[in-house]
Image: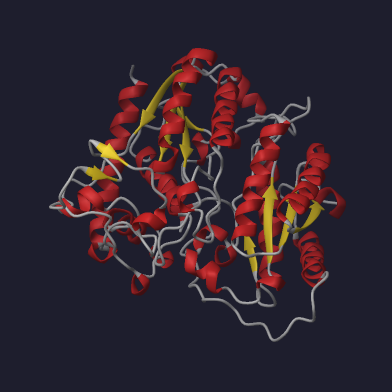
Amino acid sequence: MATTWLAAAEPETCWAHHAWPDFAALPQKEYAIVVLPIHGLTDHGADLPLDVEELVGGALLRRAVEQVKTRFVVRVLPPLRFLPAFGVRGFFEVDPETAHHLVAEVAAGVKAAGFHKLVFLNTSSINEPFVATAALDARAGCGLRTYVIHTRALGLDPARHQAGDVAPFAAHLAKLLTEIRGHLAPPLPVFATDKPMPPAVSTVPFPAYRPRYLASLTSTHLADMAGKKESLVIVPTGAIEQHGPHLPVGVDAILGQALLDAALRRLPPDLPVFVAPPVTYGKSIEHREYLGTVSLSTKTLRRLVLAIAEQVSALGLRRLALLNTHGGNSTVLASVLHEIQGSIGLETFLLRPGHASDLGAQEAAWGFHAGEWETSLMLACAPELVHMDQAAGEYPARLNDPGELRPEDAPATFAWMTRDLSRSGVVGDPALATREKGTRWLSDAAETLASRIRRQSDR
């Protein structure tokens, strides 16, 4: 499943791989643990990539979770990579207030999904006070039981263990997670696992475009990079939100990675195109009634994108494009692109992949969430996460309905929450989807996206 890279997580326990009814039906949530990995993008030395904390921390967490997942429920959220730097040479940093908002909004999604315990696994030594503060705020603000594990306290230094054996540290982490599971909880009954998932096709933790990923480069490489003014930086923006009972909550983020990976494979290796750390969480307030959705506020999403733009500018790069795969982000991003041009001075673009031209009229008009298009693409790039036996189809309107008031694309529209349009969370008909359509549409969309990237790069 190399195209669905969101983190170096153990696939079965990855939050983003589960559909919203899985969160509703999950047994024994009082015994479950949700883990939020926190990784800084920091200069640890000229010969180390900026994301060395994530490389080592991800391997550590994956090994630990494999040891405990058969004894109690664990869910691992997509990591937070945008942190304060406090004067240390950090990259893609955000101000402390934005970082606190980001953690609080993620914690609110965890609480809304019915969980009781949230563990912050932090690999960033400089951010230990920030993480401790955020954990206490989440305890007081959301009522979650919150816990903090700093990898430094385990004796693990990501810079020194990049290629080392993390097994001893993983055993210690597994022991700590087990202790947290039992804290202030009654004795654990016979463990009932949730819906089994087949093993992932691939355990490759990073996409094929990693050579173009800015966080995989060293600080020296970034400083000495040639042709900065001509280079294009792409920022993927997605969401973690419900996509009906048949698709996982990570669809938007997963498809963004799949489309970008497929498009970049079509570009010449020497074309100066790079990818910034993805904004995995998005503004999904319309889906918040469905468990598993984690929504950011307008303020937090705006500040995250601005922080990335400021970092791009500080690196001497002058051209930035957003690749957005979640409709709820669109208005915020359209506004912030103008702000980036005006206040930071970058040349900005909004990249749009191609879309299927052969959808039926009804689906093309009103199948805009978890319907034929998204389900087909997921069948093509991550079929093991699609459960067609659970698919449900609903439309908010029909082509021949009287009047002109509609939820989208009409002379008069109304602001809507997903529950206004659909009980299942699906807006469209996923029963029309096939893997063959998805393979063709993914290829066509990637070709269109690659063409648009080439066109912007040649300007």
| 10 with respect to 176 (left or right) | left
Along the viewing direction, whichever of 423 and 441 lies nearer the viewer: 423
- Nearest the eye: 407 or 208: 407
Q: Position of residue 136 (x, y in %)?
A: 80, 49
The number of discs equals: 0
In front: 301, or 271? Answer: 301
Residue 76, picture quadrant: bottom right
Query: Taking the image as drawn, is residue 232 in sight?
Result: no
Going 42% across and 51% down the picture, which residue do you hit? 417
The residue furthest front is 403
In this rendering, is residue 95 above or below 121?
above
Residue situated in front as seen by the camera: 32 or 38 = 32
Residue 416, horizontal then vertical, whole percent: 39, 47
Measured from the top left, where is residue 459 in percent x and y? 33, 16
Instruction: Report x, y in % for residue 286.
Output: 45, 49
Q: Is residue 229 visible?
A: yes
Residue found 42% across the figure and 45% down from its top:
256
